[in-house]
Amino acid sequence: MLINISSMKIYFAGAIRGGRNDAKIYEKIITYLGNIGQVLTEHVGDQDLGNMGEKGGIDMAIHKRDIKWLQSADVIVAEVTTPSLGVGYELGIAEKLKKPVLCLYRPSKDKRLSAMVKGNNQLSLWEYHNLTEARSCIDSFFKSLV
Ligand code: 6IA
């Protein structure tokens, strides 16, 4: 799939109710992705968000909006270290929509990656240990799209 990088819409997925321990990393990844294209889901890196949901928000509206954004996105980037039902669901939809998907994962003993992600060769899965490595995974992935 050939993509014009400068006008690209990027859907970033990361755990919200699944747990917010990695919110700071999400924020840094989102900032980096912002240099590449338009990140539709910047709020996922908002460290004030907590894990209960949008202030005054309605889950049905969130679901509807996120599905629309997934449909309009050119690329999905997911940080999958903290297990999240929502992120898994989004990955399944992205695969069905035939969107290019990058999954970033920090290997850890207590957070073993689901076989449904690890065993899925439709998804590009890259392991990283620090932000520098995450950035170079992102660079390689986007280069592979052009
Ligand atoms: O099951 P989880 O909550 O961990 O699912 C997280 C994923 O679902 C993220 O990648 C989001 O794209 C999506 N998601 C889950 N909750 C929200 C949400 N809640 N808003 C937008 N996307 C969501 C309200 C908080 C909002 C201000 C970030």
Image (cartoon, rainbow, N blue to C red):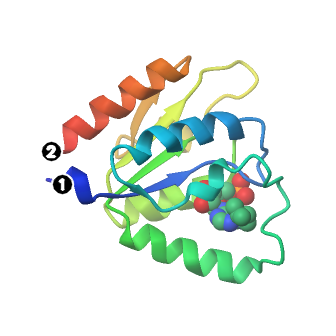
- Quadrant assignment, res 97: bottom left
Give the labeled residue for mark 2.
146
Q: Nearer the viewer, residue 111 or 62?
A: 62
Please name the residue shown 47% across and 26% down the image.
Answer: 134
Residue 107 rendering spot, x and y as whole percentages: 60, 21
What is the secondary structure assignment of the residue under circle 2?
A: loop
Q: Are marks 1 and 2 in contact (CB under 8 Å)?
A: yes
Tag 1 residue: 3
* Image position, residue 11 (x, y; %): 46, 57
Is residue 44 positioned above or below 110 on the image? below
Q: Of residues 57 and 81, which is closer to you in this image?
A: 57
Ligand 1: image quarter:
bottom right
Circle on res. 56: none
Assign the N terminus to one quadrant of the image: bottom left
Amino acid type shown at disc 1: Ile
Q: Is residue 55 above or below residue 81?
A: below
Residue in view at x 53 percent, y 23 percent: 131
Instruction: Name the image quarter holding the C terminus.
Output: top left
Q: Does the rendering let one see residue 86?
A: no
Q: Residue at x 68, y 48 (%)?
A: 15
Q: Is residue 130 visible?
A: yes
